[in-house]
Amino acid sequence: MRASSWKFIGLALLVALASAAGASASDLVLLHGHIYTGVPSSPWTEALSVTGSRIDAVGADAESAARRGPATRVIDLHGHTVIPGIVDAHIHVWLGAVALHGFNLSTPAASITPGKPKLLIARIRDYAARHPDEKLLLGRADFSPTPPFAPTHALLDEAVSDRPIIVHNISEHAMWLNAKALALAGITDEPLSDPVEERNVIRDASGHPTGVLIEAAMEAVERYVRATLTVAEQLAMIQVATRELNRYGITSIVNATGDLAEIKLYAALRDRGALTVRTRTAFGAIATPHRLTPQFLADLDEARTMYHDEWVAANLVKFFADGFTGLLAPLVYRPDQFKTLVVELDRRGYQLMTHATRFDTVHMVLDAYEQAERSNGPRERRLRIEHSSSVRDADFPRYAALSVIDVTSPAFCCGESGTNADPKEPTPSDQWQTFLKQGVVVGFSSDWPCSWPPNAFIGIQEATTREIWHSADTADIIDLPLDGAAMAGARPTGKFYTPEQRVTVRQAVDAYTRGSAYAAFADSQVGSLEVGKFADLAVLSQDIFSVPPVAIGKTDVVMTMVGGRIVHGAIP
């Protein structure tokens, strides 16, 4: 055969190979990484590639490099550790947005409480002076929510009297208002029309509101805030909040309180291409009992019908079996009331999640879930109990028997007596290994802004050490101050709470990713790095699987990717 013929055949082969390569080329290739996939059978790899928003290959560098085409973007990970994007199983985006917008007196560095009145007044006055156009002065602080230890509006009036001040307790189960805010929110000497809300207004012996509202009474203030802030202002605040979540590697969340109006805000950001966190929002307000009114049921149905895509989803109802104020968290429902609501909403096909922090309320929730299954027949429910901090030995097997998911926040776990309100309680709280050994799915969360910031790596450190932290700044706070890991000026003590309940780093990462994705009915789309799932991932500043556990909290997120799009940082 003549040389010219061989040359023609060779050229044809090159064209064919180039065409084939172009047909299978990925949009994005990540190489030279230390990638934890979260897939039990193949947990580690070094490269992956992405087409559109989804992963199309996971494997060795050579395999992914072969998927490069002329238009492929290549990111060299330089050996950085990569994990699936954090799926925060329980968070309050709107409340986090409010906290970011205003003044924050409770940070990892320090907590300024009413016990330091001059400093507190100075900080609020300074904030007000620097924000002269803000209609509402919103803040976050540690304070005792119940008398006789609770502050009054007088201290806030001394700080600023001509504009409303609304200070959220870091637990988000209490608010502290100045006189201006009380008046504008309709909290007067006259009782509120809703008896449940009125019962939670703290009043003095003469019936005057003191300035502190707990539990369901906060809804009166929330209505005022939402009516005062424009939709544009609310959208801007939420966008700031979701970008803040991206900074910590968070790519999906379950929004543990919300309503139809809030869901529409996420949808508006989605429609603008400005939503950078996948959201699933539960209907519920803090410690407020549900009532099956026609409007509530219509809103639930509209949300389920209209919002079920990869960015904005609903079909979830959040109950509060108890609150989180006082030495014993107050009950929200009688057992018979709760069971009736659970059975009916389960019959309508909604996923249910319930905040329960007491031994008896956990038992009550399990009873109601069991009745729903008996009454409505078998289906995949993925029922959830939020916190599950206090559980009697006899109730642990019921979680597995009913396939109930335990969703909890490691940052809170380890005071001197755990999260037990009674320091003499012998039953340990937050028994994560007990749940895991019984085959219960565990999802981890930040409960942001109750923890600050929403840092899963602080949570992983705490889950793997169970070290006791303590804050001298909140020593004057009654009612279980939340001075958990790296919060409210807390510092590690070198002591450990029930270390036999520690989990491994992999178990903790899985709880923040696969477990939380499962709890959100999202495990087919996110929670691990495998072909067909969304390219949601976090690139870390250090290898959390090899550093000492006490150093994991120092991890920074170098880059966050959602659906193949970089939403935070970049690889240097």
Image (cartoon, helix red, strand yellow):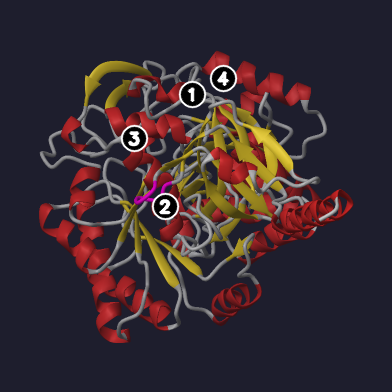
User: In this figure, which residue is indicated by the disc labeled 3?
Assistant: 505
Mark toward the start of the polypeptide (1 vs 2)? 2
User: In this figure, which residue is indicated by the disc labeled 1?
Assistant: 542
Mark toward the start of the polypeptide (1 vs 4)? 4
The residues tagged by marks 3 and 4 sit, at their Cα atoms, a distance apart of: 39 Å
Q: Residue 429, how many percent across, how many down?
A: 22, 41
Q: Residue 49, how many percent across, how many down?
A: 62, 47
Q: Is 118 rendered above or below residue 552?
A: above
Mark toward the start of the polypeptide (2 vs 3)? 3
Q: Which mark is residue 202?
A: none
* Magenta region: 38-42
User: Secondary structure beneath disc 2?
Assistant: helix
The residues tagged by marks 3 and 1 sit, at their Cα atoms, a distance apart of: 13 Å
Q: Callout 1 environment at 10 Å: few (<14), some (14 to 19), or many (20+)?
A: some
Q: Amino acid at mark 1?
A: Gln
Q: Which mark is residue 514?
A: 2
The residue at the point 38 percent across, 34 percent down is 460
